[in-house]
Amino acid sequence: MLFQYNLYFLILSITVIISTTVAFAVWQRRSISLASKPFISMMLAIAGYATVAGMEAAAIILREKIFWSKLEYVGSGSVITLFLIFAMHFTNKNR
């Protein structure tokens, strides 16, 4: 696999670092709130999505770009779903 690192890759890499750091910090304080587990899941999904998007941004060969682009759909769908679950737990509307 050939990669060309660019500004998008750098920004998405920073997003991965921030998301995993926040997820780790919340994991250490998970007993404080009921919404912490959905929030941790959402942050890890964001990190996964940003990782795949960064790989897609850095890929040079079209076949590889298409591969990473297809994997991005999994991440984007899971982030939206986990945000809804987090919002329901945060507002105590679990039903």
Image (cartoon, rainbow, N blue to C red):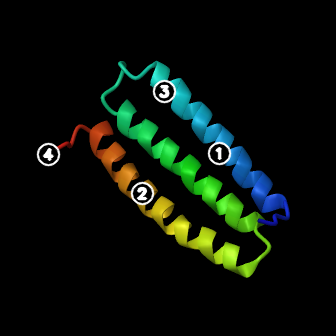
For the residues carrying marks 2 and 3, which lies nearer the camera in this image? 2
**Amino acid identity at mark 3:** Val
Disc with the residue nearer the chain's start (2 vs 3): 3
- Judging by the rendered image, the residue that carries numbered circle 4 is 95
Disc with the residue nearer the chain's start (2 vs 1): 1
Numbered label attached to residue 8: none
Do labels 2 and 1 touch, CB within 8 Å? no
- Judging by the rendered image, the residue that carries numbered circle 3 is 26
Name the one closer to the observer, 27 or 56: 56
- Judging by the rendered image, the residue that carries numbered circle 1 is 16
Do labels 1 and 3 touch, CB within 8 Å? no
Q: From the viewer's perspective, is 11 left or right of 90?
A: right
For the residues carrying marks 4 and 1, which lies nearer the camera in this image? 1
Mark 1–mark 3 distance (CA, rounded to whole Å): 15 Å
Mark 2–mark 3 distance (CA, rounded to whole Å): 19 Å
Q: Give how far across and how far down residue 71 sits, in percent.
A: 54, 66
Mark 2–mark 1 distance (CA, rounded to whole Å): 16 Å
Query: Image point 54% across, 28% down: which residue?
Result: 24
Numbered label attached to residue 78: 2
Disc with the residue nearer the chain's start (4 vs 1): 1
From this viewpoint, which residue is outermost toward the front? 1
- Mark 1 falls on what kind of element? helix
**Amino acid identity at mark 1:** Val
Mark 4–mark 2 distance (CA, rounded to whole Å): 20 Å
Q: Give how far across and how far down residue 37 sits, in percent.
A: 37, 33
Mark 3–mark 4 distance (CA, rounded to whole Å): 24 Å
Residue 47, above or below 58? above
Q: Give how far across and how far down residue 84 sits, in percent.
A: 34, 52
